[in-house]
Image: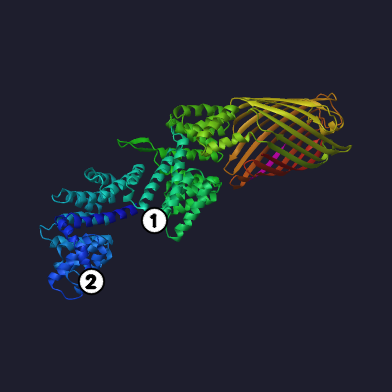
Amino acid sequence: MATFLNHQSQVSSLVIRGTAHGWLMASRWLMAVLLCLQVSDLQAKEASAAEPAPADRLQAAREEAVLLARAGELDAALLRLRNLLQAYPDDPPLIADALTVLDWAGSSAEAAQLAERLVVPEVPDWAWLPWARALRDLGRYDDALQVLAQARNQWPAAAPERLEEPVLRALILADAGQHAQAIATIERARATPGVAEVPAALAAAYVYRRAGDPGRSLQASQWVLNRHPDQPEAWQHQVFALLELGAARRALELGEARPDLFSASDMARLQLARAAQQLGWAREADGQPGIAHAEVRAVAIAAAEALAELRQTMPDTAPELVTDVEQEYLLALFQQGDYAAVRRLYQQLSEQAQQVDGALRTGVHLAAADAALHDDDPEAALALYDALLADDPWLFEARIGRYWALIDSGQYHAAQVLIDELTAEKPTHLPGADGGPGPRYWRRLELDLMAAMHRAMANRPDLAQARLERLLEQAPASAQIMRELATVYRWRGWSTRALALNGTALYYEPDVVNGQLQNLQLRQDLGQYQHAADGIAVLYQHYPDVRAVQRARRDVEDRRRWGLSSSAEYGDSDGFADTGSRDRSLFTRVHGPRLAHHWQVYGWHYYSDAQFPEGSARYDRLAAGLDWGQGPHTAYVEAHTSRVGSTDPGVTLGYAYRWGDHWRFTSRFDSFSTDVPLRAYNQGIDGWRLQAGAEWRAHESRRAQLGLGYLDLSDGNARLSLNAGAEQRVLALPEHQTRVRVDLYGSRASQEGGPYFNPQRDASLGAGAEHQWLTWRDGRRTLTQHFRLGVGGYWQDGFGTEPTADLGYAHHWQLTRLWRVNYGLGWSARAYDGNRERRWYGRLGIEGLF
């Protein structure tokens, strides 16, 4: 905007110059026209003033030169005057005439240097104003004001220059930043009888705009245009005032209506301002209730296209404009979600700024930092946010961005300290009209919500729930709080409860994208797959650039992928022969895409072998199945057969029902069960199994289960078993979680003996702890270490009770969003028929979608 004002300063100078020889000299215009007819004859004469001449000859030569200047022959006039000044270097009238013509020609530096020859008492009346204008053009405002002060002391009372001087003085004061004095001066001038109204109004438009009052500037320029609709400077002031008032579209329209009045740089600035206005609107409107995302996107794209075209047509004479356009183009790229392009352009602009010792706008730095964050590069984002905060430690947007960068880089403790600091800095309520608390401060509410959700992301959803429920008590109709609380309920496993609360939020704010999306995600959690998929598809059509919508659509598409999971184990043991040694197992499952949202075809292969005194034994079984799920119901059916031993086909049926947010009941029937001991299967024994179970889940930290099983063997033996367990999370930190559990088991066989381990009755009681440590994180890639310790006792009828122990250590790698790998080692010890057995084993697993 400073360039606009500098341009207008030059225009104002020209107007004042035009006033000097146009408005005050109007009485002599006719004589000038007549004398201009003699210009061609005057040019033919020898104009040398080097020879001595009488005073009347000097005056005639001066007048001839001035007439040439008034006729537009400024170069010829200046040539004559310079020649005369060589012969008469100290003649005040000649110097005054030369000052006037130099002023008209815009040769301010030469005029100011020439004026130094004048001695104050002998300065002609008409020399003061061009002298002051020259000094103003050179930025020597104090000197210009001093010249005008001396002029006021020298002019006679009736000098016409006295009426023009206040107008010029107001312009100089405005340029010098003395805005209050400038406004007072121009307003007195406009109220003074005899002062030319149009030049004074034009000067007022300039003064007001320099003072940061574009509204009054617009009024002054409109006053002129109402009387002189084509007045060029008034048209310019109108356009620039509208621009500063934020009416970029109207300013551009008026600029395009009179392109002859604006330089290429000025027109480019108007186009830039319009594109920037569109981008600003798009940034503010995106995601707001009642505003279609398609409309926002169309505006952003139009702005980006305008900026791209402007980048190709920018004038080379305005390098600072080139930078401005590039910065707005970067913001347009960010608005469209092209984060990689944002980062590339930011790198280029940063290098250019270093070369010219320039500075990029804060918003551009913020956009680059946010782009790095969106691009899963939190370390680069942190560096940019820290650089911004080094210049402005209280920059709110940078502090918020830094918080999210800390979260994404796994620095949860530092993020919590930062968000708690931000929250404590803001008041809960704005001041009321009566001095008491007014409405709740919206920014503090946002920070309160962020601080609460931070606890949830740091594995403490219970703390987040408590904070949000307190906030909801204070503001029971806040849909924003309801949405966040519903999210926490969902994370705690309470999808039904979350759906009801989110529905209330949607009642208050039905157009909020996050509320609509969460409603669909909760329905998907509850088995309403088709409803959720159709709704997410519609949301994506309207909000394709919203990252949460993109992720939800991606999750729906993942249900249409093929999947693979496979786990292998090798172990060796000593002591008891009935369980075998050097055992190996491999289980692989492949599933196809979801069909019609509810159906899925899958297959699996199970292989297991071990060494026994009589030789090796193995399972090698293949299965194909069909899974179905809708609402609280899930069911599956499998057909399988063995590749070794008995080839009789088998069937598996399973059904599960979810009751509310806490209970789940399961049942399963296997006509050919691989729970038959491997040694028994090697002896030609098989069997069927029936299972039923119930699981209660209070929340993410506490659960319990109960199971009942019946295994019927083909040798006439049957085993009835009961198991129960409970688990509690006792430590929850961002990188560490510890769970403890207690398990109880008991079984009874219908008959004793047999070629396999078959206790008449047995039972076990165990307690264990498992610790998970998120050791490393790089974007989506993580490494989590798992430690397991278990102890207990095992009782067998006829052999008494023996201690048991279990140790385990594993690595779990999240390689990409879709693929995971785990591997680990373990050791266990227990007794069989009174004999101690120790077992070592290793495991390897992989799981993913493709």
Q: Is residue 698 visible?
A: yes
Q: Which residues are magenta?
A: 783-792
Q: How is the image coloured?
A: rainbow
Q: Where does label 1 land, which residue?
A: 318
- Residue 786 is one of the magenta-drawn residues: yes
Q: Which residue is mark 2?
A: 83
Residue 22 position, x and y percent, is 19, 55
Callout 2 crowding tier (Cα within 10 Å): few <14, some 14–19, many ≥20: some
Left or right: 776, with 64 as reference point: right
Extreme residue in the right direction: 614
Q: Is residue 421 visible?
A: no
Element marked by disc 2: helix
Q: Position of residue 431 (x, y in %)?
A: 34, 38
Q: Residue at x 43, y 29 (%)?
A: 477
| Spatial separation of the CA atoms under disc 1 and disc 2 | 38 Å
Residue 60, percent across and down?
A: 15, 67
In the picture shown, does residue 138 fall above or below 774? below
Q: Nearer the viewer, residue 331 or 164?
A: 164
- Give the amino acid type for the residue marked by disc 2 in the picture: Asn
Closer to the observer: label 1 or label 2? 2
Q: Mainly helix, strand or loop, the magenta region?
A: strand
